[in-house]
Amino acid sequence: MPGSAPPPFTIARLIRIPAAVTLAVTLLRLVGELLHWSPVWFNPAAGGGLSPVGIVWLAPVFGIYFALRLAAAGAGPERLGRAIGYALLGAAVFFALPFLATQLEYPAVLLVVWALAAGAALLQLKPWPALFKTMLAYGLAARIPVAIVIFFAFLGAWHTHYDALPPGFKSKSLWSTYLWMGLFPQLIAWVAFTIVSATLFGTVATALWRRFAQPRQPAPAE
């Protein structure tokens, strides 16, 4: 039955190469900002902007890869339409977060954003458990190194996007700043974004694969 058959590989093995690629991009981004390479490619501003060099773009790419691998191995969703619907709902939550962020003050805004982001990610568990678990593992593998980099960036005042603080946030201490602006955002909000964006692109890709790539069964002879 779709969604229940275990894939012929472990999650650790499936995410091994994507996690290594993601780590390489993280290190490249860090080096580019420390050496003041072109801000068009390595934006040091708070939030990092939409720099072409960054791991945020890898989530949907690897989401498609993971989804197709799982579906081909018999670990796809039981109902693909429902999986797409939940992914769209999760994406809608993330689209609403920037507006919400303008309505609240620190630290309340962070708590609300984290809660909604985590909720949007958890929505993806029921319709496609295998993809959710894979993306959770990949998201942690991608974001834990970033969280480590952020700590040292705060410690050394590197003036990169890793230690840039948004307007309105008042730093009280190294650990307080790191927990509020480094560790928790990476392990909650950004892992949740990874899950939701990857699921959205992965479910759509799987639908297209089932529609156009899978061989059709011949009609029974009369």
Image (tube, rainbow, N blue to C red):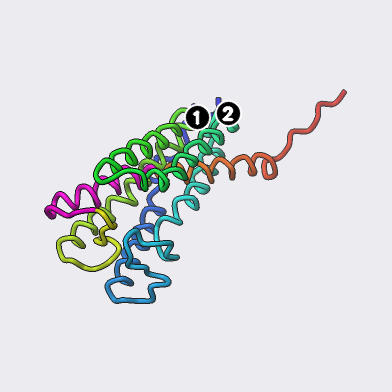
Where is residue 219 shown, x and y percent of the image? 80, 30
Residue lying farthest to the left in this orientation:
173
Residue 178 seen in this snapshot? yes
Q: Main secondary structure of the magenta part?
A: helix
Q: Quadrant of the C terminus?
A: top right
Residue lying farthest to the top in this orientation:
222
Task: Give the mark, 2 or 1, whose residue is nearer the N terminus.
Answer: 2
Amino acid type, mark 2: Arg
Amino acid type, mark 1: Pro
Residue shown at 59%/41% (left/top)?
A: 206
63 versus 165 height, above or below? above
CB contact under 8 Å: marks 2 and 1: yes
| Occupied quadrant, residue 56 | bottom left
Where is residue 68 shown, x and y percent of the image? 55, 43
Left or right? Give the position of 93 relative to 187: right
Residue shown at 38%/50% (left/top)?
A: 16
Q: Which residues are magenta?
A: 169-192
Q: Is residue 79 magenta?
A: no
The label shown at residue 127 is: 1
Give the residue pinned by disc 2: 79
Where is residue 200 shown, x and y percent of the image? 52, 42
Secondary element at image label 2: loop
46 versus 185 height, above or below? below
Residue lying farthest to the front in this orientation:
103
Left or right? Give the position of 89 relative to 48: right
Circle 1 Cα neighbour tier, 10 Å, few/some/many (<14 / 14–19 / ≥20):
many
Q: Quadrant of the N terminus?
A: top right
87 versus 51 height, above or below? above
Number of numbered discs present? 2
Q: Of residues 94 and 203, which is closer to you in this image?
A: 94
